[in-house]
Image: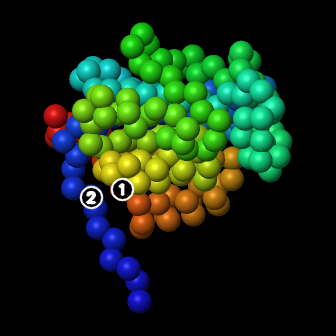
Amino acid sequence: MSLESRSLTRARRYGLVLVDLSIGFTNPALSPLASDADAIIEANSTLLALFREQGWPVFFTTVAYSDAHQASVFREKLPALDVLSAGSVLVDIDPRVAPRAGEPLVVKQWASGFFGTDLHQQLQAANVDGVVVTGLTTSGCVRATAVDSLQHNYRTIVPVEAVGDRDAAAHDANLRDLGIKYVDVLSLEQTIRLLSNTQ
């Protein structure tokens, strides 16, 4: 017997959270964590342009480690994370979608953009009740951030074209699971249409 899964009611005001679109995740020539992200960057650029044009809130996250004790068990499990050292070019947001003045950059050490950060407080200060989660990677930091967004009671959207993963099967499976249990998984076109009908 399958569970009923409904589409969420539209939020009153959305914020855009771009998860880990840093060079460490978008440039395969420089980082073992990266994958070909050109199409994902393009989709995020489209969303960024809409949010900026409308003056809606935008937030970026990046993973950066300044000492060996930060997220030590996570890094033991996935040693490639060690390349994301504070001050490295790999933790900088890809210049194609770089933050503008006034757009916060949340530095995190774990998968979720909410865990151990003030992202929730910043979203509350921006008076949002919905979050559009984009970025990299679908099965890791995007999933963790999207689930935590729901767990902070935000109406959450994940646009398919604006997220990606090194593992295509994991990408598909996680989008399916997120869409059934936690968030609305929409196309980029559907997301833009929904956003354009609010605020």
Circles 1 and 2 in contact, beta carbons < 8 Å: yes
Amino acid type shown at disc 1: Asp
**Residue furthest top as drawn:** 101
Kind of residue at badge 2: Leu
Quarter of the rendering containing residue 56 = top left
Give 130 or 95, whichever is nearer the viewer: 130
* On screen, residue 69 above or below 155: above
- Residue 39 placement (x, y as % from top left): 54, 35
Instruction: Say which residue appears at 38% left-offset and 29% top-offset.
Output: 122
> What's the mark number on residue 153?
none
- Residue 195 pos. (x, y %): 25, 39
Q: Quadrant of the C terminus?
A: top left
What separation in Å lies between label 1 and label 2 (alpha carbons)? Answer: 7 Å
In the rendered image, which residue does mark 2 sit on? 8
User: Which callout, 1 or 2, points at the residue further toward the start of the chain?
Assistant: 2
Q: In the displayed image of the protein, which residue is found farthest to the bottom? A: 1
Q: Which residue is the site of mark 1?
A: 184
The residue at the point 35 percent across, 42 percent down is: 131
Residue 1 lies in quadrant: bottom left
